[in-house]
Structure formats: C-alpha cells, structure tokens
Amino acid sequence: MKKTLITGGAGYIGSHAAKALSALGREVVVVDSLVAGHRDFLKWGEFEEGDLGDPAFLKAVFSRHDIGEVLHFAAFIAVGESVAKPDMYYGNNVRNTLNLLDAMLEADVKRLVFSSTAAVYGEPVTEVIAEDHPLSPLSPYAWSKRMIEQMLADYGRAYGLNHVCLRYFNAAGADPDGEIGERHQPETHLIPLILHTALGLRDNITLFGTDYPTPDGTCLRDYIHVTDLASAHVKALEYLESGGASRAFNLGNGNGFSVREIVDVARAVTGCAIPVVESDRRPGDSPALVSSAQAAHEILEWQPQFGDINEIVRTAWNWHQNDMAHLK
Ligand code: NAD
Ligand code: UDP
C-alpha cells in the first residue's frame, strides 16, 4: 500500500490529519522542518525532518518512500505578519510549494490535497460564500494561497496533477482525546488567545476593530473544528482516488460568530471573566467570512461532527489547560 505524505504534519491541523489517516490504517510520512511544528505532535507515522526549501531533501524523501498522494499543510500562516513580511510568505508558501510540486512530478505522484483558506475570497459580496464567489485576497498570506491554487490549476492542465484545494474557514478546537491541539508560537488566533487570557497568561484580549459593518461591529467568522477538517482530508483523498475532478471545496459550519460572541462563549465555557480591550482594525482582515460548504457535503459526503461552537471552544479549553507548560 502506498503511503500518504503530509507536509506540515507536526503542526496544528496536519497532526490531526495524521491521526485521522492512521486511525484508518493508512501509512503516513510526515515532512516538517519544525520551524513552527512540535516534536510531541509527531505521534503517527514516520517522520522526515527537513525543509520544503531544500529540493534535494524532497527528492530523497520521495525516493525513500513509495508515496501515493500528498496532503500539503506546510506554510507560514499569520495574516498580519504577511503584511509586514511578504517576502517570507511568497518564499515559503509559493516558492517552496513549487519545489514540492516538482518533486512530486519527478516521482510521478499525481494527487495532492492543498490547505487553502477562506481568506482567498477577501471582502464578501454575498452573505454566505460558495466556491464560485470572486477571489479577491486582502493580504500577502491570502495571495500566496490564491497563487498556489492557480499553480495547481496550471500543473493540473499541463501535467495531470489531480488536486483538491480545501478552503478552510477558521480552524478551531482540539483533538477530543486531548492528544494534540493548537500551539502556535507566537499565537495570533482568536480562540487560543482568549483561552490564554482565561488561564491568566495574558491580561486581556484585544478586539481588532469594533466599527465593521456587522451586527456588533466586530468581525464575523465561521469556526470549524480541526477534527472535522481532518475528516474532510480523508474524504478528499478518497475523492481523488476514485477519479474525482480537481476542484476547490469550502470547509466551514455555515454559521458566523462575531469576535464578541466568541468571547462570550469562552466566558461561559471557562467560567472566567476574560477582560477585553477595544482596538483598531488589523490590516488584511475581512469583515465577515461565512461558508457555504454544500459542495463538500454533497460531493465529498463530508459532515462535520462538531458543529456546536460551545463544543469547539470546550475541546480547545481542555487542550489549553493541559498544555499550560508550553504556554508559559
Ligand atoms: P502550523 O503552523 O501549526 O503548521 C504548519 C506546519 O508546517 C508547521 O509544523 C511548520 O513547522 C511546517 N512548515 C512550515 N514551513 C515549512 C517548510 N518550508 N518546510 C517544512 N515544514 C514547514 O499551521 P496550521 O494552523 O496547522 O495550518 C496548516 C495549514 O492550514 C497552513 O497551510 C495554513 O495556511 C492553512 N490554514 C490554516 C487555518 C487556521 O485557521 N489555522 C485556516 C485556513 C488555512
Ligand atoms: N481577532 C481579534 N483579536 C485577536 C485575534 C483575532 O479581534 O487577538 C479577530 C480578528 O481580527 C478576526 C477574528 O478575530 O476578525 C479571527 O481572527 P484569527 O486570527 O483567529 O483568524 P483569521 O480570521 O485571521 O484567519
């Protein structure tokens, strides 16, 4: 049986995918430089430590293992940082993805599932975003993902590279068994930062922008549980293996929660006060990103299991309480 290569499998979402694939008896090889990943997240499959910026390393990995397909998570991921340092983002996300694609083609590996993002849509022109919504990225991070989607389309046409772009809305929550969870350093995401505040590691949570054209002035986001993202990767692989055509799928729950609402959910889940401080907008943020994931439901037969925002925050809270040692 051929192996599934997971780039970025020592990170937050990639490690959950490694767990999901291994649970189904698939053989997994994780490639990660540990630039942002964690050795203690490497609980499933084999590990090849190295950087996608190193074509010789990639070539060696593809010759050492009989790879059938690739799940490509490895990237830099912070919107704000990408605005300040676009070279980092185009370099690691775009250029290093080209290295990966070329290594795949050389090894005759023709199936790829790519971690894209709702940020490729930019400012929404419809209340709910389907895959045919115009693409209008607002940050170098989002542009890097948009460019990779274009590269994949071109490689698909020219070289028969079959691919699925999974446009995640906001990944959140943690493994319900508590084995892995969200640990970004520095952390920039809303839910973990709120929970760090609940744990007393921060004094307050900053609300980035309270003057958006939304019901309470703060941004709306569609939070999707990381275990549900992992199961979507399994579905996407099965789709490609059964000859499905290359395309993009949104992954979200279809419900928009404001930043203030998420703070309220976290207060209820943790029982902590969680002080807030209002601040200016963060550059590159879209006012609202809410998915229609109908295509993933109908074509991939994917159904999220953790649709309740309280449950999403509860699994994250469980993880962060146990992960205190790494947070200090
Ligand atoms: P993460 O930072 O936890 O994981 C990324 C992993 O990639 C890390 O382990 C890092 O060490 C590795 N990596 C980065 N560059 C590398 C390189 N050049 N060579 C080898 N390894 C490298 O991030 P995450 O939150 O798990 O995100 C995974 C993917 O999902 C990313 O592509 C991200 O853009 C995408 N995404 C994430 C979210 C979210 O809410 N977290 C939303 C939409 C899309
Ligand atoms: N946000 C915030 N304070 C923070 C971090 C995030 O108000 O400390 C807001 C951010 O502006 C966005 C939402 O929370 O509207 C979700 O941000 P996050 O960084 O978690 O994910 P993104 O939507 O950027 O992928």
Image: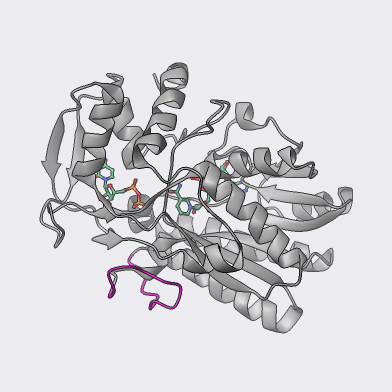
Q: Nearer the viewer, residue 175 or 204?
A: 175
User: On the picture, is 141 further left or further right than 259?
Assistant: right
Q: Please tell me whether residue 253 is drawn above or below residue 28 in the rendered image.
A: below
Residue sitting at 76 percent across and 37 percent down?
45
Q: Position of residue 207 (x, y in %)?
A: 18, 43
Residue sitting at 20 percent across and 24 percent down?
203
Q: Can the viewer see residue 327 in this picture?
A: yes
User: On the picture, is 176 further left or further right than 43?
Assistant: left
Q: Quadrant of the C terminus?
A: top left
Q: Nearer the viewer, residue 47 or 178?
A: 178
The answer to which quarter of the image holds residue 232 is bottom right
Residue sitting at 60 percent across and 44 percent down?
14
Q: Which residues are magenta?
A: 125-138
Q: Residue furthest bottom?
A: 157
Q: Nearer the viewer, residue 54 or 75?
A: 75
The answer to which quarter of the image holds residue 151 is bottom right
Verify whether residue 128 appears in magenta. Answer: yes
Q: Please tell me whether residue 322 is drawn above or below residue 32 in the rendered image.
A: above
Q: Nearer the viewer, residue 81 or 175?
A: 175
Q: Can the viewer see residue 53 in this picture?
A: no
Q: Position of residue 145 (x, y in %)?
A: 49, 64
Verify whether residue 241 appears in magenta. Answer: no
Q: Position of residue 140 (x, y in %)?
A: 39, 63
